[in-house]
Image (tube, rainbow, N blue to C red):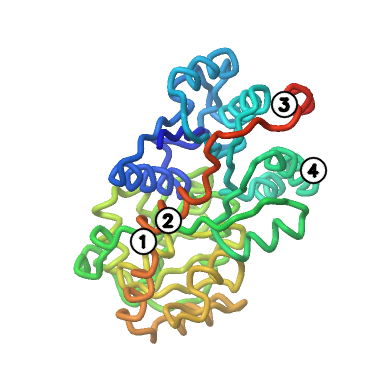
Amino acid sequence: MKILLATDAWTPQVNGVVRTLSQVIRELGAMGHRVNTVQPGLFRSIPCPFYPEVRLAFGVRRRIGNIIEAFAPDAIHIATEGPVGLAVRHWCLAHGYEFTTAFHTRFPEYLAERRLAPPGLTYALLRRFHARASRVMVPSASVRGELSARGFVNLVAWGRGVDPDLFNPARRGDLLDLPRPIFLSVGRVAPEKNLPAFLSLDLPGSKVVVGAGPQLAALREQFPQTHFLGRRANGELASLYASADVFVFPSRTDTFGLVMLEALASGLPVAAYPVAGPLDVVGESGAGALDQDLRRAAMAALAIPREYCRAHALKFTWRASATQFLQNLQPHGRAIAEPQRSARRA
């Protein structure tokens, strides 16, 4: 198949969305499919005000028709709800092309955290964006249930995977020459990640945070005993996972939490709240501890055998994720009813 994938999240961004898309595209290529990625780097763009790593493209509508028609895709997938996604959606509705979308990020909660918009309004806008999709891919059963309760339709599962060769217990070493136990957190250092809930815990040993973001300077000052390592490349990151003792995931708003799978594949037990994401990745597998008392979860995770973690993570593969993605696609075959009128409404 020829698949056109529209996304506002792309390299050099470092996040779960980009990693997911990159890995699935790689698997699709290995399976013989061709993917054309339409992303902000193809257009003029400006940094997003509260997330400067994200580029907001403009002028997309003027060029998107030529890009799509030149590629002549068998299927169109819209990964994000930004300017690129909106432009491709508009073109599809205007020309009678069916398309699929995905729900990757809880923008309503993120915007509410920054006091930029009430969640009800943002969810209404997202519901409208996804309503015309043939299928809306969601990363977990928990998110599917939440979105269904909010009126989203055509929801289907699209799981995630992990690279077991890169994230491997064999990488364990003395990279972290710190008092043990070492409690590690990896991800964007931003309000929605709820890092103070972890950093304020009274825990033995050491706390380590890997990642960059707008809260980094403030949290370094507020929690001087924590070791902030900034962003790390894949190989070093994999060694950090394998060399720590517990992975603490304090977020309450992630739709999945790919970093938890990376930690588990490295033999690192997870401590988290019992919310969407951890419930789907860890659940009752025995590979982590979920508790509303995050300290209790972190201390309980210390007793979990590392081989349990690795065995559980190996159930999640990128090949299975790519196969599920393919099955969810809607190849172009029939016109959307009244496309021109729909386009004016969109």
Between 106 and 6, the one nearer to me in the picture: 6
Residue at the disc numbered 4: 121
Residue at the location (25% across, 66% down)? 168
**Gap between marks 3 and 4, in whole Å?**
26 Å
Q: Looking at the image, is mark 3 or mark 1 nearer the viewer?
A: 3
Answer with mark 2 or mark 3, whichever residue precedes in sequence: 2
Q: Residue 337 vs residue 247: left or right? A: right
41 relative to 306, above or below: above
Secondary structure beneath label 3: helix
Residue at the disc numbered 1: 317
Amino acid, disc 3: Pro
Location of residue 332 by image quarter: top right
Dot 3 and dot 4 residues touching (CB under 8 Å): no
Residue sticking out furthest to the front: 334
Q: Residue 289 vs residue 100: left or right? A: left
Residue at the location (58% across, 79% down)? 291
Dot 2 and dot 1 residues touching (CB under 8 Å): yes
Q: Is residue 260 visible?
A: yes
Between 27 and 17, the one nearer to me in the picture: 27
Q: Position of residue 260 (x, y in %)?
A: 43, 64
